[in-house]
Amino acid sequence: MAEFVLPDTTDRDIIDKLCVGGIDVTLRKIFRRGGLTDEEITSLALQLGLSRQLDSKMTYRQTQAIKAPLLDDGTFARLVKSHCSDCLSLTQEYLRQEGLFDDMPFAVVDSGWVGSIQKTLAHLLNREIEGYYFGLYELPADAKAEQYHTFAFAPWQDVGIKTRFSNCLFEAVCSSPMGMTVGYQRSEDERIVPVYEKDENPNADRIQANAEVIRMAQVQAGGGLQSLFRLMSHPTETEAALYGNYLFSDDVNSTELQEVASGSFNNSAWPEGLAVRQRKGFGQEAFLAAVSMRKRLTYVRKEVMHRSVYR
């Protein structure tokens, strides 16, 4: 939100960052990502003639298609900026307090996926920074690839690994035990401290134990990642039952949570776990094969498209 009020942030930048796909995206959720109140959401939907579509699930194409009318109307970006007026000064003061404005090298270390936090921090700090990630599916627009370092898989590469990997399960099991930071405030002792959406991660009681179990499993497997990829892509019934009920949200706001192995083929955060929990025998294997093929085709298509653009 702080980045949205920087002088060189355009309305298109705001809309591009908020109109992104997910497991269970609705127009109401897109508006909430921008901090709009319930009254503002209702009024804007009526103004755009979209009141009936406000709570309908949106496909990725629909989230992209909504950008043009929002940009043309202009009200959405204006309302978002009105809710960001105090964000920039507090955020930059927090970053200065933590030493990020000092003349010293530092890097972002993150699970990954698209590298947006690194670009946002670089924008807020007005400096180039390095980032180290478990894996990246793609890079932000105009990013310098040499500043984004990956471990397990890289943008537009490593299709086989991505097919066997579940970023949603990874986040549910390996996230911070603290709640999601949604802003900053000044404490009684005049320090700037994070404001959490919830006091703690809904999976906090199991996350720290998981970290130790995963480390032990990796040592027994010789330090490789094959046991992790096997768990994600082809879990046993015990593993699907154990990990499938972790709570997860892939939205900017994590107020609406669902079990990671729930839903349907099209909107489950961990469809492989869902397959093992709900199906038996040949039906289970067929479902797992279908999930694998769908993911592989998605990543192959993205790789081919990237090569065709940047050839």
Image (cartoon, rainbow, N blue to C red):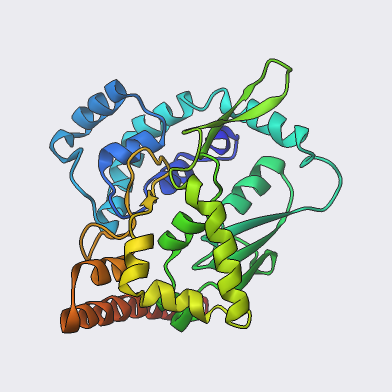
Residue 166 in the image, given as x and y percentages of width and height = 42, 67
Q: Name the foreground residue: 100 vs 303.
A: 100
Q: Name the foreground residue: 205 vs 272.
A: 205
**Horizontal placement of 132 versus 288: left or right?**
right
Query: Could you tell me which residue is drawn at 34 percent across and 24 percent down?
Result: 37
Quarter of the image where one finds residue 146: bottom right
87 relative to 150, above or below: above
Query: Could you tell me which residue is drawn at 20 percent across and 61 percent down?
Result: 264
Total numbered labels placed on residues in the image: 0
Most distant residue in the right direction? 103
86 relative to 45, above or below: above
Residue 288 in the image, given as x and y percentages of width and height = 27, 78
Q: Name the foreground residue: 70 vs 132.
A: 132
Residue 205 in the image, given as x and y percentages of width and height = 49, 46
Quarter of the image where one finds residue 278: bottom left
Query: Could you tell me which residue is drawn at 60 percent across and 68 percent down?
Result: 215
User: Is residue 309 visible from the viewing direction of this image?
Assistant: no
Query: Could you tell me which residue is drawn at 71 percent across and 44 percent down?
Result: 126
Residue 81 in the image, given as x and y percentages of width and height = 47, 29
206 relative to 41, above or below: below
